[in-house]
Amino acid sequence: MSTTTTPWDYKTIVQTHGFLGHKDGLDRKAFEKMLDELGEEGFELMWVLPDQKLHAERDGNVFIFKRPAPTT
């Protein structure tokens, strides 16, 4: 019996205060558009890490996406 593993590509996006152009909070329509674009690229949302302290970046929510890596 053989087992195969799927290689993955990962992408992270950080939502900070003022994300996508609004200092008062999240621009939901722009965020949904970004999610649609990532979905068209084959990415799916795996995990959200809320309120992360990030080294050398603005703190925020980290969204982790994955998609199957292209095979060669």
Image: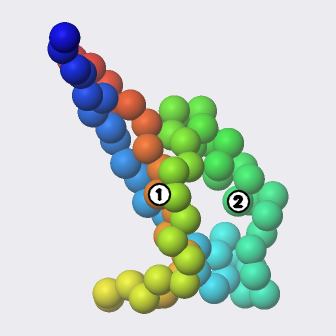
Note whether 14 is above or below 35 in the view shown.
below
Q: Marks 1/2: CA distance? A: 14 Å
Name which residue lies at 74% across and 74% down. Answer: 26
Where is residue 63 shown, x and y percent of the image? 52, 63
- The kind of secondary structure element at disc 1 is strand
Is residue 51 visible in the rendered image? The answer is yes
Q: Which mark is residue 31?
A: 2
- The kind of secondary structure element at disc 2 is helix
Q: Quadrant of residue 48?
A: bottom right
- Position of the N terminus, as image quadrant, is top left
Left or right of 31 on screen, residue 11: left
**Mark 2, residues whose alpha carbon is within 10 Å: few (<14), some, or many (≥20)?**
some
Where is residue 46 shown, x and y percent of the image? 51, 51
Q: Which mark is residue 64?
A: 1
Name which residue lies at 32% across and 88% down. Answer: 56
Note whether 67 is above or below 33 in the view shown.
above
Left or right of 3 on screen, residue 48: right
The one of 48 and 21 positioned closer to us in this rendering = 48
User: What is the three-letter code of the residue carrying label 1?
Assistant: Ile
Where is residue 15 shown, x and y percent of the image? 58, 73
**Mark 1, residues whose alpha carbon is within 10 Å: few (<14), some, or many (≥20)?**
some
Name which residue lies at 47% across and 83% down. Answer: 52
User: What is the three-letter code of the residue carrying label 2?
Assistant: Phe
> Contact, CB < 8 Å: mark 1 with mark 2?
no
Name which residue lies at 41% across and 53% down. Answer: 11
